[in-house]
Structures are given as C-alpha cells and as structure tokens.
C-alpha cells in the first residue's frame, strides 16, 4: 500500500498501545520529524510511562509542532490520538500554519497489540489498557476523521499492510523551486490582447502559431509568467485566454489564478453570477467561440493554482501578493489571500474592498511579484512589487524581468474601461515615511 502525502504536512498516527506506531514512524520518517508523547514524557520525568506529566508533555509537543510548522517542516505525531478532542488540537495547529492534516490509522488486531505490549519490559500496563484503546479506536470511523478536518485518511488494518506500506512524499503544486528562470512576469492583462502582443515583442519573444495553437520562444530561454486577471473589461479576453492556455501547454509558461478567473469559472460551471466589473464583456466574447473552447477554458480555470514559489525559494508570484508566513503552503486561507489579498470584508465609499497592507510590513526573504491593484507606477516596497499598471484603464501593461528586476512596459492603446477612480501612486510605507521624516528633520538642522 502506497501512502502518498505532501512533503509538508502533519501526519497524526492513531492507534492503540502496541499497534506499532513508533516502529512505523521510525521506519518511514526522520527522528527529528517524529514528535512522540513518550519522548516528551521521558524528557520531563526521565520515564516515558510517567502518566503524571502527560498534560505538560502534550503542551510541549504542541509547541514544538507549531515551531516546526512555522519553519515549514513535516511532522508526525506519535501518540494514541484516540479521542477526537486530542486530534482536534493537531488539526487546529496544522490549520494555523497552513499545513495539510493527514490521519493514519493503525488498526492492528487486538491480539497483536496485547502480545507486543506484554513483551515490552518497560510497559507496566497490559491487556486491559489495550482493550479499552481498541474500543475507542472502533468508535473512530474514517469518515468521521474527514469531518474532523483531516484532508487525507489512511487505514492500515493488518500487520501485513503495516509492514508493506510505503510512504511517498510529493511536493505541493505551488513548489517550483527548481525553476530558476529567467522570467518575464506579466501583470493584469484584462483582455488587452494587442498590448500583450506588443509587450511580448518588446520583451524579445518570437510568437508563432503552428498547427493552430500559439507558441512562444525567447532566444535567451526566458519564461513567461502571467499573474492572473487575464479576462474582463478589455476587448479580447477570449483571445488572451487562448494565447495563455496555449503557451502554458506548449511553451512552459506559468499562470496563476486571479479573482476575475474565479468569477468566470463560476459562470462556465453554470452557477449564478452577477455579470459586472466587465465580466459581461468576457461572456459576450466567449459566446462567439465554440463550445469546445468554452469547455477547455472551464477545465483550465478549475486547475489554476494560487501561487508559485520559484528560483530556489527566492521568488513568489501570486495575483494579489502573499505574506511570508503563507509562502509555499496550501489552505483555503492561503488561496483566498492570493486571489483577493488581505481584506477584512470592509468596503470604502466607492464600494471597493479596503485592503490590508501586508507589503508595508513584509520582511520575507523571497521577492514577491503580484498584480490585482492597479497603480500608476510599478514600484518596489520591501522586496515586493505590484506590476498591475491598469492597462485596461488606459494605463500601461507591465512586465518585470527577473532576476534583472527591470520593467518593460507598453502604453494602453486607449481607455478600454473607465476606471472607478483615477490611477494613483502607492502611498509610501510607514517605514519609508519615517525615514523620509528623519531626513527632512536632519536637513533642516543642517541649514
Ligand atoms: Mn484582481
């Protein structure tokens, strides 16, 4: 039996004493990955069986778990974990750090558990404890584990299964650390196909259309990344979609999801959506295409992921940006942040969402490149840059060359869509303002 788990997750072992949890953990995981309640009891009381320190032992275990997850390290919780309230702690901690909770039930037959426990000279308890553990385990329905929040549940119900099990770790979909670039990262296109083609010319891409699909090649082997919001408001959302889908499929381009793709995906899934913010134009444009094309778009949008971690972890791309504590992690909260940014549900006088300013506080190692918020200029703040320069609103279409960190831009051909408010420069972050205040103070003193 192959147990496929993400290489960043929390594996919660569930099983009676004597079920073989520690043996299994030692066989498949590093000693540093395994957090065993026995070990924490031993640390505190020099005796792994000392039940009087159990509460303190779990307190420490929770703390170490949190610390390791903050550092994005896989963890295995080796304890009986037979009660749902005990497991709930681990699900909660996993969620806090956007790690996937995995349940692994060791449903080893009772006779085997009893024989193993009685054979261990260090175990003072015997058959009755095993039997009560087994009764609790039988109350733990694997389906119930899913409702407790475990995203993957595995059950090993024989010694044969347990011995034959192979644990395989797979990277998360957002993990593209192996991809080193160089990249050209394109901001919100919003259906501005002519400007996109002009930008690609300026960037040095050779665009061709063999066999009816687009391909791009760059003489220096560069790679395109699209930051999402390909569609809506502009004149050719359908053609932008065709282009990006083709070059993702044939030319190694990358594309992450934007909020406008989420909405369009709902329309194509047949769900009820209010056609506003230029979505009506996209729907009109798509009505002129074939049903096969619309199906392709629907499937494509369904599979788009929220962000990529690239270049050995030095580069993160997400439509609305991403704070450091969420990089390379996966949860509903991470996805929402990537797509909508840091919002608290409040809106301003124009009904636009008030955005939290994560970039203002950003201190992460990775460069974060994002779009979503149309700006008059693309400017660096704390190693982050927004390259949405409002092309569809008559601004510019911008690409960031990475690792060079230079901007390549083309002007919009016209105002394709009236902006809700004029494009502005981003207010300076507090830290810069304070530095500026300091400078002004100093210069006044000097004169
Ligand atoms: Mn957006």
Image (cartoon, rainbow, N blue to C red):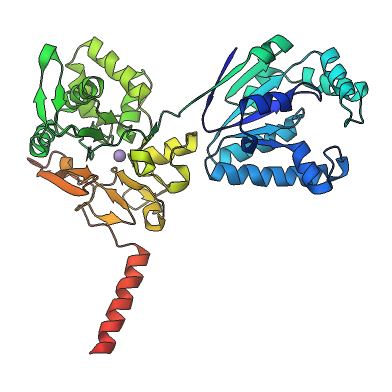
Where residue 77 sits in the image (x, y, percent)?
68, 33
236 vs 324, nearest the viewer: 324
Q: In the picture shown, does residue 20 fall above or below 358?
A: above
Q: Quadrant of the N terminus?
A: top right
246 vs 156, nearest the viewer: 156
**Image-based side of 309 in relation to 28, left or right:** left
419 vs 53, nearest the viewer: 53
Q: Quarter for ligand 1?
A: top left
Q: Quadrant of residue 103?
A: top right
Where residue 230 sits in the image (x, y, percent)?
24, 32
Q: Quadrant of the C terminus?
A: bottom left
Q: In the picture shown, does residue 145 fall above or below 57?
A: above
**Image-based side of 350 in relation to 281, left or right:** right
281 vs 92, nearest the viewer: 92
How many marks the image carries: the answer is 0
Q: Residue at x 39, y 54 (%)?
A: 357
**Image-based side of 163 in relation to 269, left or right:** right
Q: Quadrant of residue 40?
A: top right
Where residue 234 sits in the image (x, y, percent)?
17, 33
Q: In the picture shown, does residue 282 fall above or below 313?
A: above
Q: Quadrant of residue 249?
A: top left
Where residue 305 sits in the image (x, y, percent)?
38, 29
**Image-based side of 342 in relation to 146, left or right:** left
Q: In the picture shown, does residue 303 fall above or below 189?
A: above
Residue 364, can we see it?
Answer: yes
Residue 274, can we see it?
Answer: no
């Amino acid at each position: 039996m192959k147990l496929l788990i993400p290489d960043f997750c929390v594996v919660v072992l569930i099983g009676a004493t004597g079920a073989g949890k520690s043996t299994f953990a030692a066989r498949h995981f590093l000693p540093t990955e395994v957090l065993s309640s026995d070990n924490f009891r031993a640390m505190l009381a020099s005796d792994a069986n000392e039940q009087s320190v159990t509460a303190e032992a779990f307190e420490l275990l929770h703390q170490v778990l949190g610390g390791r997850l903050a550092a994005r390290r896989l963890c295995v919780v080796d304890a009986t974990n037979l009660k749902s309230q005990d497991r709930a702690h681990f699900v909660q901690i996993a969620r806090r750090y956007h790690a996937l909770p995995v349940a692994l039930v060791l449903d080893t037959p009772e006779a085997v558990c009893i024989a193993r426990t009685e054979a261990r000279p260090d175990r003072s308890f015997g058959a009755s404890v095993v039997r009560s553990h087994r009764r609790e385990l039988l109350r733990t329905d694997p389906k119930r584990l899913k409702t407790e929040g475990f995203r993957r549940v595995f059950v090993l119900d024989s010694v044969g299964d347990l011995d034959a099990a192979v644990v395989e770790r797979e990277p998360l979909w957002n993990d593209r650390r192996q991809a080193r670039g160089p990249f050209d990262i394109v901001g919100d296109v919003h259906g501005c196909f002519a400007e996109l083609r002009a930008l690609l010319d300026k960037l040095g891409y050779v665009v061709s259309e063999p066999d009816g699909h687009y391909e791009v090649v760059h003489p220096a082997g560069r790679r395109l990344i699209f930051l999402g919001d390909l569609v809506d408001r502009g004149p050719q959302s359908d053609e932008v979609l065709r282009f990006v889908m083709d070059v993702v499929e044939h030319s190694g381009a990358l594309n992450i999801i934007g909020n406008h793709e989420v909405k369009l995906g709902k329309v194509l899934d047949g769900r009820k959506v209010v056609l506003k913010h230029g979505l009506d134009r996209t729907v009109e444009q798509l009505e002129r295409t074939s049903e096969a094309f619309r199906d392709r778009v629907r499937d494509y949008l369904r599979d788009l992921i929220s962000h990529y971690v690239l270049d050995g972890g030095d580069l993160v791309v997400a439509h609305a940006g991403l704070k450091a504590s969420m990089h390379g992690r996966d949860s509903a909260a991470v996805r929402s942040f990537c797509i909508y940014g840091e919002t608290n549900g409040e809106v301003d006088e124009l009904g636009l969402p008030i955005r939290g300013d994560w970039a203002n506080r950003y201190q992460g190692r990775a460069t974060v490149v994002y779009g979503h918020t149309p700006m008059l200029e693309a400017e660096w703040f704390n190693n982050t840059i927004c390259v949405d320069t409002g092309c569809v609103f008559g601004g510019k279409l911008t690409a960031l060359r990475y690792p060079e960190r230079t901007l390549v831009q083309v002007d919009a051909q016209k105002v394709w869509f009236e902006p809700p408010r004029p494009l502005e420069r981003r207010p300076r972050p507090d830290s810069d303002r304070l530095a500026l205040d300091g400078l002004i103070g100093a210069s006044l003193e000097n004169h």
